Amino acid sequence: MLPADARLRRSDEFRAVMRGGVRTGRRRLVLHALVEPGQPRKAGFVVSKAVGNSVVRHRVTRRLRHLVAQRLGTLPEGSALVVRALPAAATATSAELGADLDAALRRLGLSSSRDNTGSRRE
């Protein structure tokens, strides 16, 4: 679970990250990120009805929340993330969602290449 101070809550916070930050897409999710030094690390999730019914959307949100909570402390200070699930996330495993999240974080330069995929360009 994400602590209360690590959650994006208001629509203007989501809007600022999605419009003012950078984004990258993967097969199952799109990651929007904005880094504002001096701010706390925060994350928010967008899982629309296109992903599935209420049960499916909540399952996807719980999986993404758990994955982001594990990685939030490793992000640069002031990082704000919006993770937008795509319809393919409905049938994805947690491992597949985690791989997409890690790849997106690496692509945006927010994560070190601590896994063995070798896809980090440096």
Image (tube, rainbow, N blue to C red):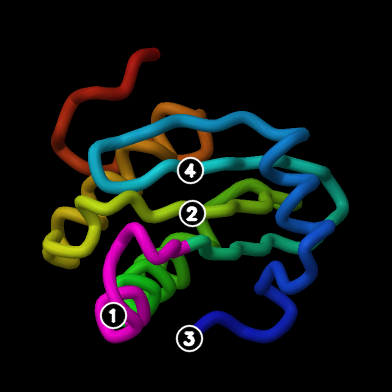
Tag in front: 2 or 3: 2
Number of numbered discs on residues = 4
* Residue kind at label 3, given as amino acid type: Met
Name the residue located 30 percent from the left edge and 61 percent from the top edge.
51
Q: The residue tagged with tag 2: helix, strand or loop?
A: strand
* Residue 70 image point, x, y percent: 40, 69
| Horizontal relation, residue 91 to residue 74: left or right | left
Q: Which mark is residue 59?
A: 1
Residue stretch rendered in magenta on the structure: 47-58
Q: Which mark is residue 31?
A: 4
Q: Residues within 10 Å of mark 4 (few under 14, many from 20)?
A: many
Dot 4 and dot 2 residues touching (CB under 8 Å): yes
Q: CA distance from mark 4 to mark 3?
A: 19 Å
**Residue position for label 2:** 83
**Residue position for label 3:** 1
* Residue 101 image point, x, y percent: 34, 48
Tag in front: 1 or 4: 1
Vertically, is 17 above or below 62? above
* Residue kind at label 2, given as amino acid type: Val
* Residue kind at label 1, given as amino acid type: Arg
